[in-house]
Amino acid sequence: MPTLAVFMTRPIKETIEKAGLGILQKLCNLPIVSLENLPNKLQKTVERDPDFLKIAQIADSDEKFIIHIEYQTNNDPSMAMRMLLYYALLRNIHKMPVKQYVIYLGGENVTMPTQLDENCLRFNYTLIDLHHLDYETFFASTTPEEVVLSILCNFGKETPQKIVERIYERLEKLVPDKLPLQGYMRQLSVFAILRQLQKEIYQKITDMPILIDYTLDPFFQKGFNLSHEEAQAIIAWKNKSLEEKDEQLQEQGELLQEQGELLQEKDEQLQEKNQLAAYLAHSLGMGNEAIAQKLNIEVDEIPKLIAEYIAKNPRN
């Protein structure tokens, strides 16, 4: 089974991989216009494969370079050495410039070194701490993957409860279908653990009109301090709540249908009365204007009412 750290970074990888250009332009502050896949399998001397590896191209330029990103949930004192090793291998294999970034997702302050300066060797990479990035950077996006990332950023003076509420409303607007919305809420829930916002997300989940089954996810239960039985109880409660809401909506729908049928029946009865009244009044020599005034309808309706009555009663 993967470690909790691996579990936490996996949704980040998937999110940035899917959203691609938009997120990279904001995170790396680069006018990237295209990305090409690059195999992330390096020589066996490297302990783990790179988290994100693409060939990128800058706007209005033929220049291409490798963009390499690592995601960290904790401080690694050997991070600079790890990035140097990646750099050397990538540069040697692909013969291209390499730009490297580490995106920090942890809750503690960053203490990782970003450079090496030993004898004749000088090396550095760019460290991005999402906690220092304004959440509006991603929140205002029309891409759901970017909106989800805003939970990891700086909230400014906003409360976590308000931010969670705003993110959910934004996602609900961008993703009206329940099934995809559930997927984004799962990602949001995992990211919330990194920000220690389990309570706020949990409260929002219990209020949501959609069902998310976390009982199959032991890591989520660990982050929320839920046992399997507690998670099952939540799902059972949510199921019952949704069923009750469905029954209420069904009853309201049936009531509205009955009311609509009654109104239609009354309209038909009134129409028949008007047809008869118009025909009889016309037969007694009353003018159309006088008939319209008596029936409180438009003058133009009188000939139509008479014709309808005659069509229904051809013997008269």
Image (cartoon, rainbow, N blue to C red):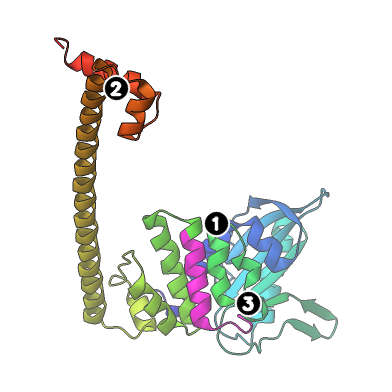
Q: Nearer the viewer, residue 205 or 20?
A: 205
Check residue 170 for magenta coloring.
yes
Position in image of residue 145 (x %, y %): 54, 61
Camera-side mark, 2 or 1: 2
Residue under pointer 2: 305
Position in image of residue 67 (x %, y %): 69, 62
Amino acid found under the numbered disc labelled 2: Leu
Amino acid found under the numbered disc labelled 3: Leu
Check residue 130 in the rendering and tell me which mark sits there, or answer none: 3
Residue 302 seen anywhere in this rendered image of the structure: yes
Check residue 214 for magenta coloring.
no
Query: Could you give the CA–CA distance between mark 3 and mark 1, rounded to whole angstroms?
Result: 19 Å
Q: Residues within 10 Å of mark 2 (few under 14, many from 20)?
A: many
Residue under pointer 1: 18
Quadrant holding the C terminus: top left
Pointer 3 or 1: first along the chain: 1
Local secondary structure at mark 3: helix
